[in-house]
Image (spheres, grey):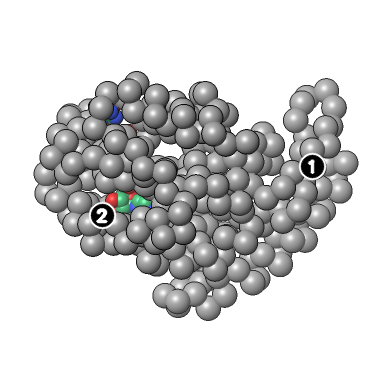
């Protein structure tokens, strides 16, 4: 069975590499080959998943389910995602974490570009971020069979939204968008505190100002877009992590 799956994925992989992100808008499609090499297309109907060491289980799955998690820097997206994973079994994919991982990967040709954007609170071109996300989703599905994802910190601007819509939207079921609302002052205090131990190059006052500008100038419009589609579940993120999670739980509890 494994060989059937392997043959199938290899042939679709060639197709995928050849066709995805063809003639990207920023005109550097070849540059993304390193990321795309490992990105397999998501299943549109069903997938067989090997789930246990002593046998192969057949699992019929629909499209992977996706919840976007948005909010200003430091609003507690990552903290709440960890709790959701434990209670509701989603897989947490943080766009920021994936970008930091790619930045740190030896030989990555995007390292400098990613770091420059991160330090200045700017948004990395979607071709990179979307490929990292798709790759992580496919790896998770293949390794665990889990097809429910919290995509944290994405989409963050119009470029993210357009790239996702053209490449991924048809392949997933968009459940809703979780929006953590919190004041700039409170978020800044949290990030500066985190900066004492996080080692993040953007948890400092200068970068935080820029990150907030990007949030206000670019991300708020994306949240509005999803509000118009009635997909946004807004949460007051100013309370303690446990109190915020009480609200989060009611939202996930309502899902089938
Ligand atoms: N409700 C809360 N009250 C107080 N502190 C919190 C709360 N939620 C998270 N924190 C703390 O604030 C900091 C930022 O939280 P977290 O990393 O979850 O935010 P985030 O929205 O994912 O941030 P970023 O977008 O910058 O990655 C962390 O140090 C975390 O422990
Ligand atoms: N869609 C995204 C998400 C993040 N970035 C960059 O990473 C930085 C850190 O993100 P966090 O979510 O971990 O705070 C962010 O400021 C951006 O520079 C991105 O480009 N695109």
Residue drawn at (64%, 47%) of the image: 64
Residue drawn at (40%, 55%) of the image: 227
Mark 1 Cα shell of 10 Å, populated few (<14), some (14-19), many (≥20): few
Left or right for 193, reference 70 = left
In this rendering, the answer to whether 253 lies above or below 20 is above
Taking the image in four quarters, ligand 1 sits in the one at top left
Residue on which the image places disc 2: 215
Q: Secondary structure at mark 1?
A: loop
Q: Which numbered disc flags the more N-terminal residue, 2 or 1?
A: 1
Residue on which the image places disc 1: 60
The spot of residue 22 in percent (x, y) is: 57, 75
Residue drawn at (47%, 51%) of the image: 231
Viewer-nearest residue: 115 or 227: 227
Residue 37 numbered mark, or none: none
Q: Quadrant of residue 213?
A: bottom left
Residue drawn at (79%, 38%) of the image: 59
The spot of residue 156 in percent (x, y) is: 36, 56
The spot of residue 36 in percent (x, y) is: 57, 59
The spot of residue 118 in percent (x, y) is: 28, 52
Looking at the rendered structure, the number of numbered marks drawn on it comes to: 2
Structural distance between the alpha carbons of marks 2 and 1: 39 Å
Viewer-nearest residue: 13 or 138: 138
Considering the image in quadrants, where does the C terminus appear? top right
Mark 2 Cα shell of 10 Å, populated few (<14), some (14-19), many (≥20): many
Q: Quadrant of residue 10?
A: bottom right
């Amino acid at each position: 069975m494994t060989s059937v799956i392997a043959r199938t994925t290899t042939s679709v992989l060639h197709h995928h590499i050849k066709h995805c992100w063809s003639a990207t808008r920023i005109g550097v499609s070849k540059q993304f080959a390193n990321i795309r090499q490992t990105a397999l297309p998501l299943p549109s109907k069903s997938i067989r998943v090997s789930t246990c060491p002593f046998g192969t289980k057949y699992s019929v799955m629909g499209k992977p389910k996706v919840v976007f998690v948005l909010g200003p820097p430091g609003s507690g997206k990552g903290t709440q995602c960890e709790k959701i994973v434990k209670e509701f079994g989603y897989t947490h994919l943080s766009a920021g974490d994936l970008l930091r991982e790619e930045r740190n990967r030896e030989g990555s040709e995007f390292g400098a570009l990613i770091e420059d954007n991160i330090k200045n609170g700017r948004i990395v071109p979607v071709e990179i971020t979307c490929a990292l996300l798709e790759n992580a989703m496919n790896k998770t599905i293949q390794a665990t069979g889990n097809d429910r994802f919290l995509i944290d910190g994405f989409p963050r601007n119009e470029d993210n939204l357009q790239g996702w819509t053209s490449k991924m939207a048809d392949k997933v079921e968009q459940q809703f968008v979780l929006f953590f609302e919190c004041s700039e002052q409170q978020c800044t205090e949290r990030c500066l505190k985190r900066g004492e131990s996080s080692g993040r190059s953007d948890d400092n006052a200068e970068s935080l100002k820029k990150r907030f500008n990007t949030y206000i100038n670019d991300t708020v419009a994306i949240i509005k877009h999803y509000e118009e589609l009635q997909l946004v579940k807004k949460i007051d993120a100013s309370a303690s992590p446990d109190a915020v999670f009480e609200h989060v739980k009611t939202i996930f509890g309502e899902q089938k």
